[in-house]
Image: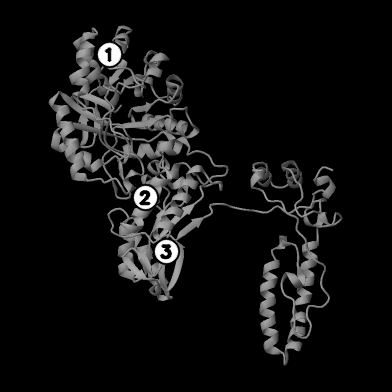
Amino acid sequence: MSVNSTTVNTVLGPVPAEELGVVSVHEALLSVLPGAEHAFDITLDRAEIFETLAGKLRDFRAHGGGTIVDSTGMFHGRDVPLYEALSRTTGVHIVASTGQGPEELLGGYFLTPQTNPPTPWPAEKFADLFSREITEGMVVPRVERRGPAGLVTTAVTRAGMTATDESLLRGAARAALATGTAVTFRYGDDAAGELDIALDEKLPADRVAVGGLDRKDAADAGAPEKIAARGARVVLDHVGTEDDEHLTDTDRAALVADLVRAGHTDRILLSVGATGVAKGHPANDLPYSHVLTAFVPLLTAHGVGDGDVRRILEANPRDLLAVR
Amino acid sequence: MSRVNTVLGPVPAEELGFVAIHEHIGYGMPGSELDTRWWKSPEQRYEETVPKLRRFHQLGGGTFVDATGICNGRDVDHYKSLSAKTGVHIVACTGFVGGDTALPHFARADVDYLTRQFVHEITVGIGDTGSLAGVIKVGVSRGGRMTDLDKRIYRAAARAALATGVPILRHRGQVSFDITALCPDGTWTPQVTKEDLLRTVEGFDERLVDITRGLDMDTVNIRAVYDIDPVGTWHSDSVVLVGDAAHSMLHHQGQGANSAIEDAGAIADALREAGSVKEGLALYQATRKPVTDKLQAISRQGWTEDEINDVFPGQKPAAAATGE
């Protein structure tokens, strides 16, 4: 695959794609369950949040990390001015995202339309909302717009795609197509079927990244292989998480090795899915550096060569994030 | 309770003056803050709101109760400055306008947590504003049927009200409407099925037919309505009939309550004009009875099968309408 000499939208402005270094594409910086900011028993101490996040970003950088993508979208605690200060202070590139979802995480504004009969917010309106965050800048609600978002993100309900989820996914795909940005989504219960929705919007497959593919149910369904075979990006975004729902790191490494052997190296993306600071929901406290410190040695042990590892950690996310 | 919590601190109830009990300084469905079309600059907000509150105050208004619940753009710091500069007491609320305005953090919460949120905002403060909530807002989600979340919020509000002595303001969130139709079943509560109702509205505007088709019959009250024949004499020398006692009519012209109010005005005028009570009552009947006789006749028009075409052209007589 050729590497276009293009730029990536970070919170401090466009950065040449080749400067990103090792990228983790599905992480969270400040992650706030919508509504938690109003809770009587939750405090948001910006100085403390900054210190915690700065420490985690420095650790990532110390272990060879270059860029963190906050892929939580526009309505889950995104704090663009804070991320700008963090990036300036730590030297880690930060890419923030637009988008939101799944349906359950939306505000009532998007769910109780004043139409008769009530219909979900149409894809076109979501596309407009998300596109403006790229062409005009990300919103600091009711205050101002800042720099452009670097990624469009959404998610599908785990129990299955709702009508609003489909609007979100189509809207995200249209925003991506219109702005040259990539789209990423956490799949619900049918990774391939949901990918088809995004592709139905004429978005090239390699502009779509599908997250959650290191869930056991995804692996059991052969979803990583199917997604890669369609030319989309496979995101194993819970590296380090070993629970009832997810593969162990050993199985994850075996999955990566299988995909590499099948010729899908340039489709693979890795991420920890860490939450730097979580408010209102349980944190994933793993360090952003876990892929570099713990998982890369496992890949090596599974026979994945250094060149392929570099490709997965640097070239693949660079191709995804570079604005076309 | 002799104290009322305003945003600038507790005040004696005696100081409230005229109270506007259910108002909004600003209101937005949660998530609308992401859509710049609804944004207003602080300059605009003060420019629009200050003159309105000042006018309210000049006309004798003392207190403004803002019923904008948690997650709906409630902005207590803004209210504090408005209150201080205009002299209008402003009471802020805790609670939710409806379950569909509660963001996920609260939508997932149980009654106990919601109770503690409300009590905290009443006794400790709303966020970090230091202001105490003076009322608790509750309401039913759009669609008009109580959701499980609505019920949890109502219970929590009741518990918080009991614990703190602060009252509840509620929003029904419902639209009710009447269908009045001929029915051969003359009992107080006729048995009518949805199919009967659909036959009744057949030929009406398709939107009305759709509403009828979508009715949940568990929420439909079916009651017979009755009127009386005009009464020959409304008064003795010292006793008089007014309202429905004098001229009960069917409701679908909307003249029943209006006629009662006009009766009251006519009695006052007649007693003032006449030389004695007896003459006054006679004058009242002479003034009002010709009018209400006519209204009674109009309201009854259409309630015989040969007149129905005048009132509801193209509709079928009672037997056909109920399919018998």
Which residue is at the far bottom?
B275
Q: Where does label 2 land, which residue? A: B116
Judged from the image, the secondary structure of the residue bearing numbered disc 2 is helix
Q: Which mark is residue B85?
A: none
Q: Where does label 1 land, which residue? A: A250
Tell me the residue at 47%/44% (across/down): B149
- Between the residue at mark 2 and the residue at mark 1, the CA separation in whole angstroms equals 44 Å
- Between the residue at mark 2 and the residue at mark 3, the CA separation in whole angstroms equals 22 Å
Residue under mark 1: which chain is it in?
A
Residue A319, given in percent of the width and then of the height, sits at: 27, 22
Q: Which amino acid is tagged 3?
A: Val
Tell me the residue at 42%/22% (across/down): A195
Residue A220, given in percent of the width and then of the height, sits at: 41, 14
Q: Nearer the viewer, residue A316 or B297?
A: B297
Mark 2 vs mark 3: which is more N-terminal? 3
Residue B306 seen in this snapshot: yes
Reply above or below: B170 against A45: below
Q: Where does label 3 land, which residue? A: B65
Q: Which amino acid is tagged 2?
A: Arg
Using residue A28 as the reference point, say whether residue B289 is left or right of it. right
Residue A216, given in percent of the width and then of the height, sits at: 37, 18
Judged from the image, the secondary structure of the residue bearing numbered disc 1 is helix
Q: Are marks 2 and 3 on the same chain?
A: yes
